[in-house]
Image: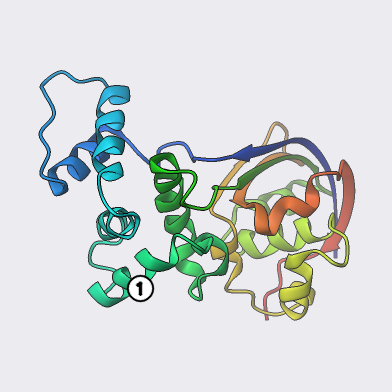
Amino acid sequence: MTTYRMSIVEFTELRELDGDWTAADYLKLLKRLELDGPEGMSEVEVREMCLLGLQDLDPAEAAEVVLAYKFEGNLTDGQIKNFSNEFQFEKLWEHGGDMELHRTMFSVGSLLSAVNEQLFPTPDAVRVTMEVECKDAESAKLLQDDTAPQLIVRMLSAGMDDDAVLKRLFADELQSGNFPDAVSLIWDLDVEHPTAATAIVKVTSSGYWLDSLKETTAFTWEGHSQTT
């Protein structure tokens, strides 16, 4: 059993994640919209042109274009059609049945909200930055091995109240055993080691899972990397 001591140094709410949408992405969307941008447009200009093109479509049609681009080859036409209608009413990065799709659904949702924030749900990702004090260098290394997502999700849950969504929906998995959904719960993970036995851990996910840490400042967790 290893004791970890966590201090939350930053809790950041995000409406779009870095790198989700680039000038190259906007140009490809413009091509799908059958729109041509002049040469030499800046990223800001090509984004604005892309948003205007999507605003000219029916909301479901706009969602279908963005979904088809982001999930090309991974969803059927029927699935894309269904999701394009649901996107106006549901945060599919939270409530969609397949958790493996949530990260990309947020990317879709962040752009659609920029297209029309009145018709599409507001994106609500969260990045939690923690200073982690570990027992020794070996326990610190566990934060970057293959089971790190399971360990880190369990660690985060220790800083939440018992009525947190994460604790209610994954009560058994948080206690012990294999926790395959942990990989989908963590959208982005960055771990740095200022010293051998400390770490700076940045976790990004939906506010649906992490909002319970908003008022938390420090907590401890005792656990291990065992997954079976």
Left of 39 or right of it: where is 82? right
> Mark 1 = which residue?
82
> Residue sitting at 35 percent across and 73 percent down?
82
Return the residue nearer the eye: 139 or 187: 187
Left of 214 or right of it: where is 45? left
Task: In the rendered view, tell whether residue 20 sits above or below residue 90.
Answer: above
Task: In the rendered view, tell whether residue 197 sits above or below residue 146.
Answer: above
How many marks can you see? 1
Q: Secondary structure at mark 1?
A: helix
Q: How is the image coloured?
A: rainbow
- Can residue 192 be spotted in the picture? no
- Can residue 43 be spotted in the picture? yes
Residue 130: quarter of image: top right
- How many residues crowd around disc 1 within 10 Å: few (fewer than 14), some, or many (20 or more)? few
Return the residue nearer the eye: 112 or 178: 112
Q: Where residue 3 sits: x, y (%)?
A: 87, 56
Residue 228: quarter of image: bottom right
Where's the N terminus, which quadrant?
bottom right
Q: Where residue 15 sits: x, y (%)?
A: 54, 40
Return the residue nearer the eye: 114 or 101: 114
Residue 27: quarter of image: top left
Q: Where residue 52 sits: x, y (%)?
A: 28, 36
> Residue sitting at 79 percent across and 61 percent down?
157
> Residue sitting at 25 percent across and 55 percent down?
65
Q: Where residue 83 sits: x, y (%)?
A: 38, 68
Task: In the rendered view, tell whether residue 38 sits above or below residue 86.
Answer: above
Q: Amino acid at mark 1?
A: Asn
